[in-house]
Image: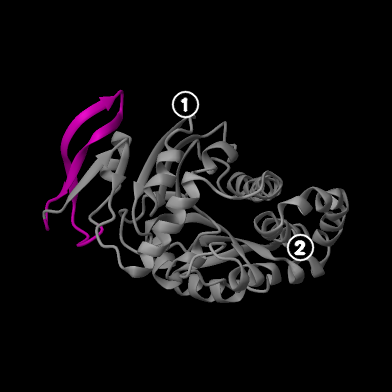
């Protein structure tokens, strides 16, 4: 946890000011072991392995999420072929994220980036903002995922990891330049999460998301027939419902597009096969180039947005008068 984070967080339980209580181990400006304390309610938040733990209350639904993602962090059963496809789609999305930052924040030399539901923080490796100074804050409920994220090394970023519930108040208002969420919103209370993201953003700050579309047929099959493929809590979203709630939270939609209309379905299909019949995966991968061609063609047509199994949206926080 970087020293700069101390002035950006507040108590997740009462919204009070929290201060650095104890530093047991520090490497340069990175606090590795220690604790923070809320001045108002007295709650202690531990810092372990450089991760600030702000997860105080765990109900049944949250416990299910934690169990699922902790198990995923220990060892996913995902077939290497399915993982390869998923990573390619991730690169497409992060390319959209980076282009948007350069387009809307071209003159900012430094940015504070918040990732909601960061998991293992692939963003640290995949978001190529080499010419900007970045303070990164990743929030997730799974300590095991965050421990994996802590091993990512990027010397030009100041990386902060928080174990916490993104439905709650974790950060102060008006401290974030760019918030991103990669397939995490449908695990959260949409209204609460978007409300917090909007409050955290500075005026004209950006919020970018990539979410599975509720029309995704293969995702429905996975939820219905494959144990452990999804969590019990998640609720797939339609782009229009995200837009409606985001606008009520003071976020204006600037861009929207479907992502990989055929490739995403294909990835889900391969992912399902990798769990039920791995021997068929290599045969299916023979269609990679055909799928890529169809994706590229459809992406340039209006039909691509309609058929897309996932969607990208870019919002800007409305400036107050």
Query: In this rendering, would 144 be left or right of 183?
Result: left
Magenta-span inclusion, residue 36: yes
- At x 19%, y 44%, the residue is 36
Q: Nearer the viewer, mark 2 or mark 1?
A: 2
Q: Quadrant of the C terminus?
A: bottom left
Q: Main SS type for the magenta part?
A: strand
Q: Find out whether the residues at labels 2 and 1 contact each other: C-beta distance under 8 Å.
A: no
- Percent x, y of residue 134: 46, 37
233 is higher (above) or lower (below) than 166: below
Query: In this rendering, would 96 be left or right of 146?
Result: right
Tag 2 residue? 261
Q: CA distance from mark 2 to mark 1?
A: 36 Å
- At x 36%, y 54%, the residue is 174
Colouring method of the image: one colour
Magenta-span inclusion, residue 140: no
Residue span colored magenta: 12-41
Query: In this rendering, would 143 be left or right of 53?
Result: right
Nearer to the camera, 46 or 127: 46
Q: Residues within 10 Å of mark 2 (few under 14, many from 20)?
A: many
- At x 22%, y 44%, the residue is 46
Nearer to the camera, 289 or 202: 289
Residue located farthest toward the top when viewing the structure as drawn: 28
Q: Residues within 10 Å of mark 1 (few under 14, many from 20)?
A: few
Q: Quadrant of the N terminus?
A: top left
Badge 1 marks a residue whose secondary structure is: loop
Q: Is residue 213 visible?
A: no
**Numbered label attached to residue 155:** 1
């Amino acid at each position: 946890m970087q020293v700069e984070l101390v002035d950006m967080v507040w108590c997740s339980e009462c919204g009070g000011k929290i201060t650095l209580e104890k530093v047991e181990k520090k490497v340069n400006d990175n606090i590795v072991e220690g604790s923070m304390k809320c001045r108002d309610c007295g709650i202690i938040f531990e810092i372990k392995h450089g991760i600030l733990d702000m997860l105080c209350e765990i109900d049944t639904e949250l416990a299910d999420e934690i169990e699922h993602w902790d198990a995923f962090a220990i060892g996913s059963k995902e077939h290497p072929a399915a993982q390869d496809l998923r990573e390619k789609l991730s690169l497409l999305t992060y390319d959209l994220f980076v282009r948007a930052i350069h387009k809307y924040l071209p003159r900012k030399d430094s940015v504070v980036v918040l990732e909601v539901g960061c998991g293992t923080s692939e963003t640290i490796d995949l978001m190529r903002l080499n010419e900007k100074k970045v303070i990164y804050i990743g929030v997730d409920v799974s300590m095991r995922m965050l421990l994996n994220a802590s091993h990512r090394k990027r010397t030009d970023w100041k990386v902060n990891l928080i174990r916490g519930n993104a439905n709650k108040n974790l950060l102060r208002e008006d401290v974030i330049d760019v918030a991103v969420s990669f397939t995490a919103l449908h695990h959260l209370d949409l209204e609460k999460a978007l409300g917090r993201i909007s409050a955290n953003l500075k005026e004209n700050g950006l919020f970018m998301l990539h979410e599975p579309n509720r029309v995704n047929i293969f995702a429905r099959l996975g939820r219905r027939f494959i144990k452990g493929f999804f969590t019990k809590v998640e609720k797939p979203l339609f782009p229009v419902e995200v837009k409606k709630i985001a606008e009520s939270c003071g976020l204006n939609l600037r861009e929207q597009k479907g992502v990989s209309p055929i490739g995403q379905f294909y990835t889900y299909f391969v992912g399902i096969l990798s769990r039920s019949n791995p021997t068929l995966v290599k045969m299916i991968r023979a269609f990679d180039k055909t799928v890529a061609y169809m994706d590229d063609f459809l992406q340039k047509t209006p039909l691509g947005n309609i058929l897309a199994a996932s969607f990208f949206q870019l919002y800007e926080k409305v400036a107050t008068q």
